Amino acid sequence: MPIQVRIPVQLRALTGGQEVVTATGSSVLQLIENIDKQFPGVKDRICEADGKVRRFVNIFVNRGRHPNLGESADADFRER
């Protein structure tokens, strides 16, 4: 199922200025990787080389901060 993802101003240069993009995935990491396929460079700005979300990046699901991203972006975002 396609998911709408809001892109912060700091990353919109990578998405051609789009504020909202559509992607699919069952985990945060899959969603980020799908967005990166459409807009190369997004994943490098959000994740460390080991796949962990950078500590200063906040991921929100349904308007709430995602609680399960401490170790990896591979958490299932639908658990929220």
Image (cartoon, grey):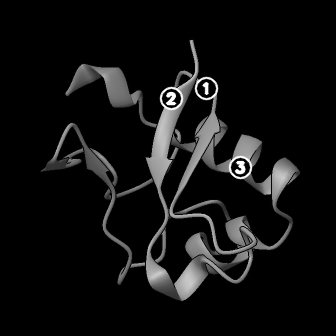
Q: CA distance from mark 3 to mark 1?
A: 10 Å
Q: Is residue 76 left or right of residue 68?
A: right
| Residue that appears at 59% across and 79% down | 11
The amino acid at mark 2 is: Ile
Residue position for label 2: 3
Say which quadrant the C terminus sits in. top left
* Image coordinates for residue 39, horizontal then vertical, percent: 81, 61
* Image coordinates for residue 69, horizontal then vertical, percent: 34, 52
| Comes first in the chain, label 3 or label 1 | 1
The crowd level at tag 3 (other Cα within 10 Å; few <14, some 14-19, many 20+) is many
* Image coordinates for residue 31, horizontal then vertical, percent: 60, 39
Q: Nearer the viewer, residue 72 or 57?
A: 57
Q: CA distance from mark 2 to mark 3?
A: 11 Å
Residue position for label 1: 25
Frontmost of labels 1 and 2 is 2
Q: CA distance from mark 1 to mark 2?
A: 8 Å
Q: Nearer the viewer, residue 55 or 59?
A: 59
Q: Are marks 1 and 2 in contact (CB under 8 Å)?
A: yes
Q: Secondary structure at mark 3?
A: helix
Q: Is residue 13 above or below residue 2?
A: below
The amino acid at mark 3 is: Ile
Residue position for label 3: 35
Q: Is residue 20 above or below residue 54?
A: above
Q: Is residue 71 left or right of residue 45?
A: left
Q: Residue furthest top?
A: 1
Q: Secondary structure at mark 1?
A: loop
Q: Residue furthest left?
A: 64
Q: Secondary structure at mark 2?
A: strand
